[in-house]
């Protein structure tokens, strides 16, 4: 009883409360910093995979919420692979839903243009944040070509390339995010680079 | 530079160029998209750790009902005295007590004291009601009555 009184004496309660509050605030700040660091890349990964801005935003938001709700208590160094694993799962869910929907709609005699806004015109989806001088135009053309080449890659190759090259995850982190072995990551990445090289050679990228 | 080196060089160049292009595109996202991403981030930070709380909240009513039911059962269930754990062993102990006590057993006492009043009465009752067979069964000779 004396030990208990020593541990949580009434004079210590405000200190403990402050410590808990500080810990909570630190955790929230760390999570905010992490999400701020990955949100744009995550959006671009989702956008290139789904070719739809609104779907990409939804997918990123879902991934953020799930990471925050389920894995915020994990060590911060585990967040990145976990976040991208969630993101890839969400992207795959959307792709499956689309696939089922398109299969069903294919039987509908009255279906019109089923793209409902997800135009494949990559130029229309080009970024609008910068002016477009001549140099920028060339860069935009290369970006469009790159996005088309990435879109044409098989899913696993595109995932490996985006996570390794764009996001900068190491092989182990990419393997965790893709739920496969490190050897598979290396194979997918190598094939992706070879395919991009074959497709983008004319742009002298 | 041989073919292998040139291929390696090309691969390295593609890796660097594509990374630079993609990073530049991520930096040039529209204001609308950046705003949506910021909102999503803030919502996610607010939702931090709520999964565990939600799970607890989801199970709290069920836990309360189960606890209440258990308490009701404990309070309202009929309390029965516990049966003897080993009845045979208990009987044997009682027999030992009887044999060890100083008080003589009834049957032996009756025989030793020639106190046959009870047997006589029982024999009379038997002969008047049930017949001699019952008296014989009681172990008292009917001829002596």
Image: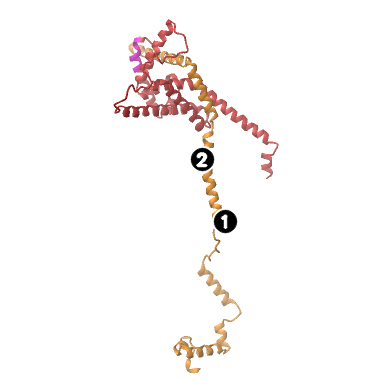
For the stretch drawn in magenta, the main secondary structure is: helix
Queried whether the magenta region covers residue B133, the answer comes back as no
Image quarter where the C terminus of chain A lies is top left
Examine the rendering and report whether any part of residue A168 can be seen. Answer: no
> Considering only order in the chain, which callout, 1 or 2, is on the residue closer to the N terminus?
2
Image position, residue B52 (x, y; %): 52, 36
Image position, residue B125 (x, y; %): 50, 89
Q: Is residue A128 above or below residue B40?
A: above
> Residue B22's quadrant in the figure?
top left
Q: Is mark 1 on a helix, strand or loop?
A: helix
Image quarter where the N terminus of chain A lies is top right
- Would you say A79 lies left or right of A98 here? right
Q: Is residue A32 above or below residue A1?
A: above
Crowd tier of the residue under label 2, counting other residues whose Cα lies within 10 Å: few below 14, some 14–19, many 20 or above: few
Queried whether the magenta region covers residue A196, the answer comes back as yes
Q: What stretch is highlighted in magenta?
A: A194-202
> Residue A170's quadrant in the figure?
top left
Crowd tier of the residue under label 1, counting other residues whose Cα lies within 10 Å: few below 14, some 14–19, many 20 or above: few
Residue drawn at (42%, 19%), measured in percent from left and top?
A165
Query: Mark 1 belongs to which subunit?
Result: B
Q: Is residue A88 above or below residue B14?
A: below
Image position, residue B101 (x, y; %): 60, 77
Identify the mark at residue B58; answer none if there is no mark.
Answer: 2
In whole angstroms, how far apart are the C-alphas of marks 2 and 1? 27 Å
Please name the color used to draw chain B: orange
- Would you say A29 lies left or right of A50 here? right
Identify the mark at residue B108; answer none if there is no mark.
Answer: none
Q: Name the residue under label 1.
A: B75
Q: Is mark 2 on a helix, strand or loop?
A: helix
């Amino acid at each position: 009883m004396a030990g208990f009184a020593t541990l949580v004496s009434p004079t210590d309660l405000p200190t403990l409360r402050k410590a808990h509050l500080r810990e909570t605030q630190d955790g929230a700040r760390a999570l905010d910093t992490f999400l701020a660091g990955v949100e744009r890349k995550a959006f671009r990964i989702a956008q290139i995979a789904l070719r739809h801005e609104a779907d990409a935003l939804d997918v990123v938001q879902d991934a953020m919420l799930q990471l925050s709700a389920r894995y915020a208590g994990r060590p911060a160094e585990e967040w990145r692979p976990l976040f991208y694993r969630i993101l890839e799962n969400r992207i795959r869910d959307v792709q499956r839903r689309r696939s089922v929907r398109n299969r069903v709609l294919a039987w509908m005699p009255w279906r019109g243009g089923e793209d409902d806004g997800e135009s494949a015109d990559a130029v229309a989806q080009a970024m609008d944040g910068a002016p477009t001088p001549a140099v920028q135009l060339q860069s935009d053309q290369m970006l469009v070509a790159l996005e088309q080449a990435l879109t044409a890659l098989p899913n696993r190759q595109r995932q490996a390339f985006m996570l390794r090259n764009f996001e900068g995850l190491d092989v182990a982190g990419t393997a965790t995010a893709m739920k496969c072995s490190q050897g598979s990551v290396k194979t997918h990445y190598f094939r992706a680079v070879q395919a991009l090289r074959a497709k983008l050679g004319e742009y002298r990228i | 530079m041989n073919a292998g080196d040139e291929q390696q060089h090309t691969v390295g160049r593609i890796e660097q160029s594509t990374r630079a292009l993609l990073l530049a595109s991520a930096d040039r996202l529209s204001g609308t998209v950046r705003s949506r991403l910021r909102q999503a981030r803030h919502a996610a930070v607010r939702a931090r750790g709520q999964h565990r709380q939600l799970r607890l909240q989801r199970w709290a009513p069920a836990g309360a009902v189960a606890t209440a039911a258990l308490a009701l059962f404990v309070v309202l269930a009929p309390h029965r005295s516990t049966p003897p754990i080993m009845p045979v062993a208990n009987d044997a102990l009682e027999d030992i007590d009887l044999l060890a006590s100083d008080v003589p057993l009834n049957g032996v006492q009756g025989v030793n004291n020639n106190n046959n009043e009870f047997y006589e009465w029982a024999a009379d009752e038997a002969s008047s009601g049930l017949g001699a067979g019952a008296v014989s069964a009681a172990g008292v000779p009917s001829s002596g009555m």
